[in-house]
């Protein structure tokens, strides 16, 4: 092993960053909505004495975890699909429980383990393909596993459990869209606020001094996501004259201008960074009657985020670029290419296959070994392996393993303390709702912190569906977690992922082609370059950085010259500046 390769492997296996806390806008409101989605359909069942059934609408209510930051129009579509998926997971699991009785062991248990592996792989693949981050795939698997290992004596039970899951999913869907009436532009405001903060990080002294371009990459990706949320493509403010554009559009255009013009001359600008942070803070505050705006000497014509809080959602296709006679849909489609996961690129499916295979393999092996060793609640081992493998590469898998180990240890202590008091069914449901709130509030800040509350949440839901002695539950969860984490790590290390290197080559080729297209457009003196040209180039350069980072997290680094990547990235940003001036 060469010294370079040893250094790379050491960096991949380093746990650095696993305990970092991230800032998240709107976490409190999202957590309240998730807890309410669980409570509303479950409480009537508990009050009517049908406690064991309360777990099924709670499983359906996990729908709320999808589409956390999406604009409402798209969120409605995504959550509708997620609702069907969560309901299907519960329905298929309940059907298996009724047909083959996995609790008796033998062939029935083997079939359920195989079905869990298939469910895990499919859920991982679909969540990655649709760019739905978070715990979505793991929660789908959890819903299937709880239903498949629960009580279901016949078709009537299957229909009842599936119907209750559908009720919980529908409740989550409705609550996720309530804000459309109350504050319809909030997702757009939050997306723009993130973009302003990322740009402020770049403009602050030392912000771009890491020499790797990661700060600039994060800012570029965040600004593109803000445009995507607004349904627009990058333009200058002057080009939007005559449009009814609000503060979000102005600030996003301003961020784009500052980002592009700073690429060639990365001079720190602390006053502008402070101004952007102030505007970002205003965008995240939901006042109906805001105080007076704060002007900035550099931008005397800038509308304050407080004085003009309008953030339009996706406009019609013919005005998406601000020019009714131009091809708005083309520019918007370019912006809607995956910013950060390589979707839309050739071979994208192949890139997603190995992570999905890893997750399916780890789930099946962990569940099978737990059954062979006669572990109680053996599906917990499968769930732990799936949670560890629900990641991007080996580096993120190791981070998840560490986070899950620490989080599970703390969560088991909490669960033991709660279950030792033998809470009544009503109190049990109330505690589940509280833990759901805490989990959703913290998991986006740090996965390990979320697992602290996810562990007692899962144990209490299992106890609600199939009551068992406290010591047995904690013992089974401990053994299952240790086994699942170890199996997950082994799968991540042994199943070598060669596709990231191919993704880097494709991303590099795409970036070079987009740069050549931009140079051709700039060389045509008879025409003004179309805004879609710079959008496509920006998406290409973001994907190039994301592909390189994903490959860097595997044990075997992509065999691509770093200088070649840096040159392609620099060329793209210089061309973006020229396009910006010309357009």
Image (cartoon, rainbow, N blue to C red):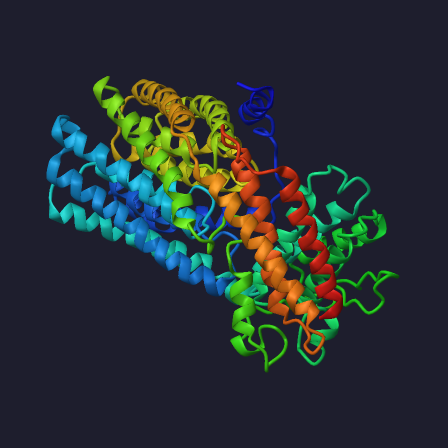
Q: Give the camera-side residue of 264 and 314.
A: 264
Which residue is rendered at x = 65% and y = 53% of the image? 220
Estimate the x, y position of residue 491 in percent, counting from the top left. Answer: 37, 27
Residue 26 visible in the picture: no
Estimate the x, y position of residue 275 in percent, counting from the top left. Answer: 80, 54
Q: State how many labels appear.
A: 0
Which residue is rendered at x = 70% and y = 54% of the image? 573
The part of the image, by quadrant, that contains residue 559 is: top right
The part of the image, by quadrant, that contains residue 321 is: bottom right
* The C terminus sits in image quarter: bottom right
Which residue is rendered at x = 56% and y = 23% of the image? 5
Residue 315 visible in the picture: yes
Estimate the x, y position of residue 122 in percent, counting from the top left. Answer: 32, 44
Q: Give the camera-side residue of 234 and 172.
A: 234
Q: Is residue 263 above or below residue 21?
A: below
Relative side of 227 to 174, left or right: right
Q: Give the camera-side residue of 263 and 48.
A: 263
Q: Give the camera-side residue of 49 and 535.
A: 535
Relative side of 396 to 520, left or right: left
Estimate the x, y position of residue 407 in percent, counting from the top left. Answer: 48, 26
The part of the image, by quadrant, that contains residue 144 is: top left
Q: Is residue 454 above or below residue 158?
A: above
Relative side of 347 to 540, left or right: left
Relative side of 107 to 578, left or right: left
């Amino acid at each position: 092993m060469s010294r370079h390769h040893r250094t790379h492997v050491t960096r991949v296996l380093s746990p650095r960053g696993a305990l970092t806390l991230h800032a998240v806008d709107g976490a409190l409101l999202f957590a309240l909505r998730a807890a309410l989605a669980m409570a509303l359909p479950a409480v009537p069942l508990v009050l009517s004495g049908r406690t064991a059934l309360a777990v099924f609408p709670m499983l359906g209510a996990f729908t709320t975890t999808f589409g956390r930051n999406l604009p409402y129009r798209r969120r409605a579509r995504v959550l509708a699909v997620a609702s069907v998926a969560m309901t299907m997971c519960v329905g298929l699991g309940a059907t298996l429980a009724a047909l083959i009785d996995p609790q008796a062991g033998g062939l029935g248990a083997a079939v359920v383990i195989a079905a869990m592996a298939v469910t895990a792989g499919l859920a991982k693949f679909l969540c990655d393909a649709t760019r739905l981050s978070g715990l979505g795939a793991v929660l789908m698997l959890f819903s299937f596993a709880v239903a498949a290992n629960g009580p279901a004596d016949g078709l009537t039970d299957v229909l009842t459990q599936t119907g209750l899951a559908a009720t919980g999913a529908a409740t989550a869907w409705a609550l996720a869209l309530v804000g459309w009436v109350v504050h319809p532009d909030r997702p757009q405001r939050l997306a723009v606020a993130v973009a302003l903060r990322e740009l402020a990080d770049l403009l602050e002294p030392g912000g771009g001094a890491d020499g790797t371009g990661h700060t600039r990459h994060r800012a570029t990706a965040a600004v593109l996501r803000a445009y995507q949320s607004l349904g627009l493509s990058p333009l200058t403010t002057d080009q939007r004259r005559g449009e009814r554009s609000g503060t979000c559009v102005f600030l996003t255009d301003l961020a784009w201008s500052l980002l592009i013009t700073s690429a060639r001359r990365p001079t720190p600008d602390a006053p502008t960074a402070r101004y952007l942070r102030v505007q970002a803070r205003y965008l995240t505050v939901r006042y109906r009657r805001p105080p007076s705006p704060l002007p900035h000497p550099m931008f005397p014509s800038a509308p304050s985020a407080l004085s003009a809080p309008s953030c339009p959602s996706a406009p019609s296709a013919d005005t998406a670029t601000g020019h009714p006679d131009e091809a708005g849909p083309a520019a918007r489609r370019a912006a809607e290419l995956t910013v950060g996961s390589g979707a839309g690129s050739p071979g994208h499916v192949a890139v997603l296959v190995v992570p999905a295979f890893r997750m399916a393999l780890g789930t099946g092996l962990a569940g099978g070994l737990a059954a062979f060793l006669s572990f109680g609640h053996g599906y917990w081992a499968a769930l732990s392996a799936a949670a560890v493998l629900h990641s991007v590469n080996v580096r993120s898998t190791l981070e998840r393993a560490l986070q899950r180990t620490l989080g599970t240890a703390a969560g088991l202590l909490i669960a033991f303390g709660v279950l030792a008091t033998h809470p009544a069914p009503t109190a049990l449901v109330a505690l589940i709702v509280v833990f759901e709130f805490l989990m959703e509030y913290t998991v986006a800040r740090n996965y390990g912190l979320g697992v602290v509350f996810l562990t007692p949440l899962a144990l209490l839901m299992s106890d609600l569906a199939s009551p068992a002695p406290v010591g047995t539950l904690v013992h089974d969860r401990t053994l299952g977690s240790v086994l699942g984490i170890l199996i997950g790590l082994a799968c991540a290390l042994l199943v070598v992922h060669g596709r990231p290197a191919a993704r880097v080559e494709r991303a590099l080729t795409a970036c070079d082609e987009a740069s050549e297209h931009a140079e051709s457009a700039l060389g045509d003196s008879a025409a003004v370059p179309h805004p879609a040209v710079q959008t496509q180039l920006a998406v290409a350069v973001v994907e190039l950085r994301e592909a390189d980072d994903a490959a860097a997290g595997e044990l075997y680094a992509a065999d691509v010259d770093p200088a070649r990547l840096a040159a392609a990235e620099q060329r793209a940003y210089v061309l973006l500046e020229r396009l910006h001036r010309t357009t």
